[in-house]
Image: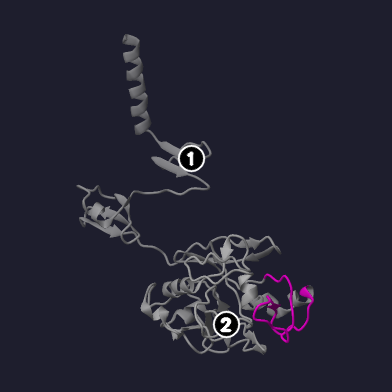
Amino acid sequence: MKKAKLLLVAIAMVACYSLSAQMAVTTDGNSADASAMLEVKSSDKGFLPPRLTATEIGNIASPANGLFVFNTTDNKAYIFVSADNEWKEVSYGTGTISPPPFIDDRDSKSYTTVQIGTQCWMAENLAYLPAVIGPGTSSETVPYYYVYDYNGTDITAAKATANYTTYGVLYNWPAAMNGASSSAANPSGVQGICPTGWHLPSDAEWKILEGNTDTQYGVGDPAWDGVGYRGYDAGKRLKTTTGWNSNTGTNAVGFSALPGGYLYNSFRDLSNYGNWWSSTDDSDVVGPWYRDLKCDLDGVNRLNNMPNLTGFRVRCLKD
C-alpha cells in the first residue's frame, strides 16, 4: 500500500511538471519552440478553438483577458479585451484560399477551382471533348460536341485551336446531360458530361451561386426566381476583367466567366455572350433552363427559350 501511495505521488509530481513546462502537440515529435509555452504543429490538420453561439459566449463568467472563441452565430472569431470589457471581433483579410486544381483523369486536363459560399465550382469552362462535329450538324436527342469556329471531326485539330484553349467546348443539352434525366434538385445528382466527383448544376444551384455573388440580393431572394436578367451586379462580379466586347467584369468571386459565344444554326457572339446549361428542364416552353451573361449588362439572365440542340458551355460543380 505504501509503495502504491509513493507511485501516485510520483505520477502527480510528473503531471504538475508537465503542466508547468513547455508543451508540444506535434506530428514530427519535436519539442515546442523556445518562445512558445504551447506549440501545435501539423501538416494536414488545423487548430480548432472552442465554438460557441453568441448567447453561450455572453454567458461565460468573468472571461479572461485574451480569451479566444469562435462565434457560430455569425461565423466570426472573437477575443475578450478586459480593458474594454467586451468581446472584439478578430479582423480578417480580404483574401481567401482557393481549392486545389482538379485534374480530369479522362484527358489529364487540369482545372482551377473556386469556393463560393458552400459551393466549389470549376473556374473554367469544361473542355472534355470525346468527339467533335461542325455547326451544320445538330440534334435534340443525339449528343454533339463543338468547338467555336471549327468545322470538322478531327479532335486533335479542334483541340489545337485558340478557341478551344480559351473557351472550352460547346455541348448540346443531350451531350451535357450524358443520358441523365432532368433534375431540379439541390444538388442535382446529374453527373452528365462532368468528371467523377462533379456534376452539372441544377437551376436551383445556379440561383445559390447568384445569391452568393450579388451585393444586393442574397441567397433565397425571390429575385432569383424571375425570368430574364435579374440581380444587381452578380453578372459583373462573375465576369472576367478581360475578353468581353464592353462592360468587362470584376471577377470579384473568382468564377472567371468568359464570353465564348454559342451555337444555334451557326456560331454566334463570341465576345458578347457567355451561356451555360443547367440540368433542369421543368417547363413546356422550349428548352432547359440556362444562364446567360452579356457584355453590356450587370445582371444574370435566366431563360429556357433555346432548344436542346443549342450549343452552350458547361461549368461543373463539385459533389
Instruction: Tell me the element at label 2.
Output: strand
Q: Which residue is labeled 1 in the image?
A: 26
Quarter of image, res 151: bottom right
Mark 2 packing: few (<14 Cα in 10 Å), some, or many (20+)? Answer: many
In the depicted structure, whether residue 108 falls above or below residue 291: above
Q: Nearer the viewer, residue 237 or 94?
A: 237
Q: Which residue is labeled 2 in the image?
A: 274
Residue type of the residue flagged with mark 2? Gly
Compared across the picture, whether 59 is left or right of 44 comes to left
Spot occupied by residue 201 in the image (x, y as percentages of width and height): 53, 70
Label at residue 9: none
Residue type of the residue flagged with mark 1? Thr
Q: Outermost residue, front direction?
A: 284
Instruction: Tell me the element at label 1.
Output: strand
Colour style of the rendered protein structure: one colour
Compared across the picture, whether 125 is left or right of 133 comes to left
Spot occupied by residue 281 in the image (x, y as percentages of width and height): 53, 77
How much space separates mark 1 and mark 2, taking CA atoms?
Answer: 49 Å
Membership of 276 in magenta stretch: no
Marked residue nearer the N-terminal end (1 or 2) = 1
Magenta region, residue range: 128-155
